[in-house]
Image (cartoon, grey):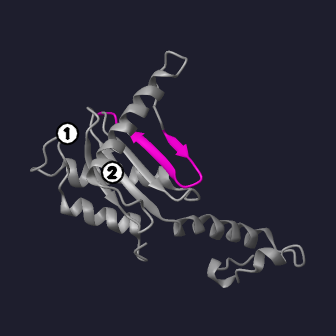
Amino acid sequence: FFLLHPSFFPSSLPFLLPLFPLPSSIILIMDKQQHHATHFYPIYSLYIINKAGGLIYQSDFSKDAPKLTMNDHLRLGSTFHGLYAITANLKPTTQTSTGIEVLESDGFRLHGYQTPTGIKFYLTGHPQREDLDQLIHKIYVYYSDYVLKNPFYELEQPIHCQQFDVVLESLLKGPTGR
C-alpha cells in the first residue's frame, strides 16, 4: 500500500479507470483531489448585517462579482435580512428556525449564518463552490477575533478594521488572487 500525492496523477486518469483498475487507496486520493478542486471556483461577496437589518460590512472578492453601487449593496443587505425574517417565520413547528441558510441558482450560491447575537453573515460564490458553509464559520471566528476584540469597534456599527480586511482577503481570494 503506497500513499501517492494527488499531483502525481495526470488529469486524464479518471477516464482511464475502466481500462486500468486501481487499488482503492489511489481512488480515495483521486476523490480527495477532485473534492479540493472546488477551491478554484471564486468567492464573490461577503455581507455582514446587524440585528436591525443594516449592512455593516460588504466586500467583493472576485472580478466576477457583480459591479454594484453602495446603494445596491445596502438594498441587498436589507433584502437578505427580510428573507431571513420571512423564512424564519415559515417553519411549521414551534422550534426556532435558522432562517435562510442556502440559496442556489444557476449563477451563484449563497450561504447564510446567524450568530447567537443576531449578526447575519452572507457569503456568495460560484454555484459549484461547495465549501461556503465552512468558510462562513471561519469568517465568524475572524469577526470575533479581529472585530469584536478591537477596542475601537462599536457594536452594530459599520466595520472598519484593516486586520479583518487582510485576513478575509487571504482566506477568500487565496494565493491566486481570484
Amino acid at the residue labelled 2:
Val
Q: Foreground mark, 2 or 1?
A: 1
> Which residue is at a point 44% across and 43% down the rendered structure image?
112
- Residue at which label 1 appears: 156
Based on the picture, tell me whether residue 133 belongs to the magenta stretch.
no
Nearest the viewer among 45 and 138 is: 45
> Which residue is at a point 53% across and 70% down the rendered structure image?
40
Q: Is residue 96 visible?
A: no
- In magenta, the rendered stretch is 101-117
Left or right for 132, reference 155: right
Nearest the viewer among 60 and 26 is: 60
* On-image quarter of the C terminus: bottom left
Most distant residue in the top direction: 94
Which quadrant of the figure has residue 163?
Answer: bottom left
Q: Can residue 32 be seen in this view?
A: yes
Q: Where is residue 79 in the image (x, y as percent from the top left)?
A: 38, 38
Which quadrant of the figure has residue 92?
Answer: top right
Based on the picture, tell me whether residue 104 belongs to the magenta stretch.
yes
Q: Where is residue 36 in the image (x, y as percent from the top left)?
A: 58, 67
Amino acid at the residue labelled 1:
Glu
Nearest the viewer among 66 and 9 is: 66
- Identify the element where label 2 is drawn: helix
Nearest the viewer among 8 and 70 is: 70
- Residue at which label 2 appears: 141
Neighbours of disc 2 within 10 Å: few (<14), some (14-19), many (20+): few
Q: Where is residue 82 in the image (x, y as percent from the top left)?
A: 38, 32
Q: Which of disc 1 and disc 2 is earlier in sequence?
A: 2
